[in-house]
Image: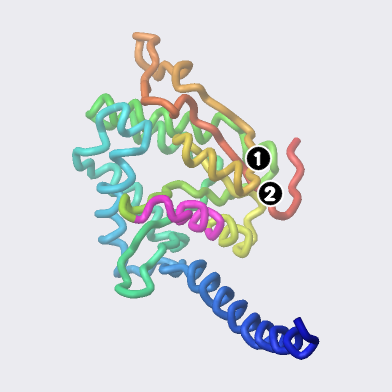
């Protein structure tokens, strides 16, 4: 082939290659574009979030599901989630195109006296299963001694995380928890906590570099009753409740 022929091929390649690269980059960018935005929940979102909790959180959360409390409406759960919502730290993932809530990360602050208050409240609950669940949550709050270890009076707690069934598998859970973690940091909290009752939540915590500080195997928790048998028998892979923390301002424990 002549030099002229080679130069013609080179000129064609040099003309078409940038266009191919441009199309590839456009396709790549388009593929990565998220179909949701993360925003703070507004007051008008609260009823929808409450409804979504009963569809996508309680039926699948290992402790409520194991006690058969996930599918029947329980006003005590609504009161607690309402207290979380009014603190104003809840984040929601909203669809860009229709504004639907696809998932949420509900966050609250926790104080050293909260476990005692919850235990006292649980004693007055008539339903034995709900009572046992609340006592467990009080025990779980208290067990790692985080307020004492990190010398803080308030902890930022990522307490409820859920994603609609049809939106799972898109990485939305990890994005919501990352946003929750960042919110706690931006608000100046020195300790950010996650009680991972689900193995899937624990997996996200590991990915986000939270530190595991406490673990309660479900088979070891026998509750407050005389039977001394495990209260929770959730299906695999949910074998334990794990407490994770992040200390964004390099707080050292005692």
Quadrant showing the N terminus: bottom right
Colour mapping used in the image: rainbow
Please name the residue that numbered disc 1 is placed on: 211
Provide residue 233's location: percent of width, then percent of height: 36, 21
State which tag comes first along the sequence, 1 or 2: 1
Tell me the residue at 63%/56% (across/down). Answer: 189
Mark toward the viewer: 1 or 2: 1
Q: Quadrant of residue 231?
A: top left
Provide residue 82's location: percent of width, then percent of height: 33, 54
Residue 129 lies, with reference to residue 204, above or below; the image says: above
**Disc 1, SS:** strand
Residue 167 lies, with reference to residue 4, above or below; the image says: above
Please name the residue that numbered disc 2 is placed on: 247
Tell me the residue at 51%/35% (across/down). Answer: 141
Q: Residue 233 magenta-drawn?
A: no
Residue 48 lies, with reference to residue 229, above or below; the image says: below
Q: Which residues are magenta?
A: 167-179
Q: Are marks 1 and 2 in contact (CB under 8 Å)?
A: yes
Residue 115 seen in the figure: no
Provide residue 130's location: percent of width, then percent of height: 29, 31
């Amino acid at each position: 082939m002549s030099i002229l022929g080679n130069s013609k091929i080179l000129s064609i390649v040099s003309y078409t290659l940038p266009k191919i690269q441009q199309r590839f980059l456009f396709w790549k960018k388009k593929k990565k574009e998220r179909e949701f935005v993360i925003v703070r929940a507004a007051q008008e979102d609260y009823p929808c979030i409450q409804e979504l909790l009963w569809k996508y959180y309680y039926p699948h959360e290992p402790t409520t599901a194991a006690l058969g409390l996930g599918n029947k409406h329980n006003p005590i759960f609504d009161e607690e989630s309402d207290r979380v919502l009014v603190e104003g730290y809840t984040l929601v993932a909203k669809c860009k195109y229709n504004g639907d809530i696809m998932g949420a990360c509900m966050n609250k602050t926790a104080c050293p006296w909260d476990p005692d208050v919850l235990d006292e409240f649980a004693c007055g609950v008539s339903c034995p299963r709900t009572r046992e669940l609340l006592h467990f949550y009080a025990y779980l709050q208290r067990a790692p001694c985080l307020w004492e270890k990190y010398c803080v009076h308030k902890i930022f707690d990522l307490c409820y995380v859920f994603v609609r069934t049809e939106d799972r598998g898109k990485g939305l859970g990890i994005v919501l928890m990352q946003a929750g973690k960042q919110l706690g940091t931006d608000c100046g909290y020195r300790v950010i906590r996650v009680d991972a009752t689900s193995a899937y939540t624990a997996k996200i915590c590991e990915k986000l570099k939270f530190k595991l500080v406490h673990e309660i195997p479900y088979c070891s928790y026998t509750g407050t009753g005389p039977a001394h048998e495990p209260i929770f028998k959730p299906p695999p892979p949910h074998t334990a409740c794990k407490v994770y923390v992040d200390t964004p301002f390099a707080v050292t424990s005692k």
